[in-house]
Image (cartoon, rainbow, N blue to C red):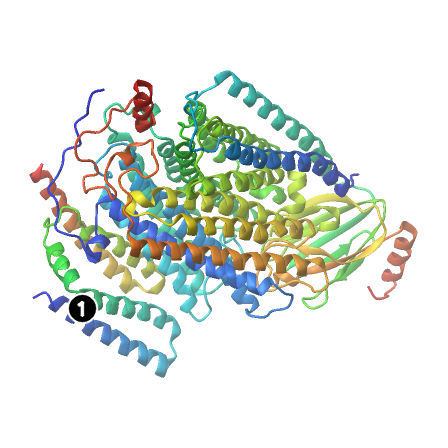
Amino acid sequence: MTDTRHDYDALARLYLPIAAAVVLLVLLLVVAFAWRYRARPAQEGRPSRVSSAPRTEALYVLVLVAVAALLLWRTFTVEARTDRGVTGAGVQVDVTAAKWHWRFEYPRAGIVQRGTDEHPPTLVVPAGRPVDFSLRALDVIHAFWIPERRFKRDATPGYTSRFSLVFPRAGFWRDGGECSEFCGLRHAWMRFHVRVLPPDAFARWVRARRSGAAA
Amino acid sequence: MTAVDAPRTRVAPPRRGLVGTLASTDHKALGAGLFATAFAFFLAAGVLALLMRFELARPHLQLLTLHGYDELFTLHGSTMFYLFATPIALAAGVYLVPLQIGAARLRWARLALAAWWMTIGGGLTMWLGFLTEQGAADVGWYAYWPLSDMPSSPSVGTDYWIVGVLLAAAAAIALAACVLATIVTERAPGMTMLRLPVFCWTMVVSCLMVLTAFPALIVAMGLLLAQRQWGGVYSGSAGAFDYQHLFWFFGHPVVYVVFFPFLGAVAEAIATFSGRRWFGYKPFVVSLLLFAALSMSVWGHHMFTTSAVENRYFSLTSTALLVPAGVEYFDALATMWRGRIRLATPMLFALGFLVLFAIGGTTGIWVASPPLDYHVTDSYFVVAHFHYTLFGGSVMGLFTAIYLWWPKVTGTLLSERLGRWHFWLTMIGMNLTFFPLFFLGWDGMPRRVADYAPGTSWSTLNALSSAGSALLAASVLVFLWNVRRSWRRRAPAGPDPWGGQTLEWATDSPPPRENFTGALPAVRSFAPLQDLREAAEASA
Amino acid sequence: MSGRPGVAFLVWAALLGLLAAVLWAVFAELDRLSVLMPAFAVALTAALALGGWRAARRAAARAFAPQADPDTSWPAVLAGISLVLVLLGLEVGTFLIFIGGGLFVAAAGGLAREWRAERRAR
């Protein structure tokens, strides 16, 4: 069980400051050097002839390798959680992507949420529990993206990918899900809504849908 | 200091007109022609981008249809990669490599000449799609199968596009072979491989990558064409993944192919305008080779979300790229250290390159992490990332090269004042266009969408980006004005207006037909003219 | 003598233009048009370049004579263009593959002549 957004934020908290620091350092050094070493008309002495510093450079390479190792260690740790795979228990949603809409089937509950090109379906999930997804596409490659969860996965025809997501907070996200792999003319409109219900409300919704109420 | 005999001279030809230039095997005319062809495609692809940005400035469709937008982004990306960036990088090599290595000619020049015409033909074929009934290719520049197969994309424009890509790719392979052959066989006496100028080393690794990676593109496209005509080639998920592997095996190295020569130009500019030779030459050569080798092994990072690749392997090789990149920044800054820096226009663009590519590179390390990539891939974040590396890197490096070598190629000088205007408009325009896209991607806007829902922050961010694109257009117009003005003024440049360090500055501007008349300076290092300068200073 | 290549191209361009106009006006055949129109444009441009530009005419006359200018190679240009036609023929029609193939053979012959002349000169 992993909160993909929490995982993303944890990694971003490491990567973003390092990236920003590197960019600012480069900017600072470029501006500082361009100013400090600018050619002045009445300048004495020559530019430095030193053109190598093997030990400094080797030390610097070790620092770079260490930074890479740190980033990789944290990435691999987080990725192991994110890509752990399905839990096998709880809510199961089978996602089918086809031009240009989504379909969500809940096999254990016997419910189907259908969408059309004009009316996106709503993915309804319980809060705080892992939800197992299976994802497939019927025609071309699509991709299932829930930005709020910081997670996406490709839907490749002929291949079923499986993953597990947790939705910590209840709420409704209009257009909370998108297709993010270009799939033709109406790719921009291939969306779905996301509704996260507290577990008892979710159970009520399942019962209501099973007995034929509207989605 | 011993003089070296000039390469054997040949009889001077009759005066060459435009028609003669079109069929010239003189690498200077050929290189200039290929360069101009590629730059024309840059302008054409830029117009497509401006149309897209105009459309995206506000929600709802204003100018384009959904289908038209798909054609635009397909042709924008394809033109930029196949018809602009790759040919122009190779053109720089075709023109400069013989001069920098003290050679009189390009090896296999007729092959290069045929390749130039194949590039022109391939480009026209690709764009021919716009004239067909169903329009140009609309499947994205990478044309994933099965979207690019007949059922989803029956338009003949897509077939024309594939033919265009095949021609451009074959031409690139031919040109890379010529440049590499020239470096191997035509170096001046005394110029060992470890005395090759920095720019030539960047051409070496670029050509190596073209020769190793572009065949994969030819296979992918050839098979796609066969699939579309006869079927039975790609099938099922294995077919989809195979296509992606083939394509990205080419598709990642190509971004380094179009990057390294301009990194080389930036290195030459920084060295020249700091009055110092490039720092850390040997580590730099090693890092170039490491960079190129790594770049051949990272392609799976384009497929992190497919569940079909070993994400950790590709994350490892992709993150490892920060090591050679870091070495290159160290060498660039160390070259400036204790130098005597002149902020001529080439140097301005080179410094702009350093800053902008840093943003592109660090965001590249970001997307090398699968959990981070799961959110931002196929979103405007990654669009921003690669425009910082491609525009902030390759295009800034291209303008560095143009301003640096314009005097040598034409014998005239570009205006410094207009060059500064060009530079600052580019810096502001580029950042205004592409920085908001990071936030758009973080916020959930996917790529390749002609429209978006109103009433969110996306409208403001898109409007900012489109405003920036107008500034970029203005910056290019300033450059073209500079070119026109300099062409008419013809301020003579002389052989070495900048205080250059490599052999091309030891001959006339423009160089004579056989490149060097009289004796070449002795080659004792990768910066022969700098050696002479420092020896003269020492004895003064 | 120098004016004649230009006239031939001009006539060819006029014929292509007429065909293109008929295709467009009468048959609304856009796909065929998309090949004919650029061909017409290229032919017209070639006509102007060769027929109207005196210096270019003189250079072209010299250039077409084999080995007159060791720095040009029209067979190489033809080789490139014929390969374009061959690949384009995969889409447009087999006739274009044959045309391109034939031109490529001619180009190869020209290249062979150039290489032989170069070897003799060395």
Where does the image place residue A158, in percent across and percent down from the top left? 60, 50
Q: Is mark 1 on a helix, strand or loop?
A: loop
Extreme-front residue of the structure = A42
Extreme-bottom residue of the structure = C26
Extreme-top residue of the structure = A55
- Quadrant of the image containing the C terminus of chain C: top left
Where does the image place residue A170, in percent across and percent down from the top left? 86, 51
* Image point (57%, 54%), residue name: B433
Q: In which quarter of the image is residue B18?
A: bottom left
Neighbours of disc 1 within 10 Å: few (<14), some (14-19), many (20+):
some
Q: Is residue B229 visible?
A: no
With B19 as the anchor, is A167 left or right in this view?
Answer: right
* Image point (42%, 69%), residue name: B132
Residue nearest the viewer, comparing B49 with A37: A37
- Quadrant of the image containing the N terminus of chain C: bottom left
Q: In which quarter of the image is residue C40?
A: bottom left
With B435 as the anchor, is C100 left or right in this view?
Answer: left
Where does the image place residue B65, in percent across and percent down from the top left? 55, 69
Give the labeled residue for mark 1: C52
Q: In which quarter of the image is residue A77?
A: top right
- Output the chain of dot 1: C
Is residue A78 positioned above or below B412 on the image? above
Where does the image place residue A86, in percent across and percent down from the top left? 75, 41
* Image point (62%, 52%), residue name: B437
With C4 as the anchor, is B435 left or right in this view?
Answer: right
Q: In the image, what residue type sits under mark 1?
A: Gly
Q: Is residue B268 visible?
A: yes
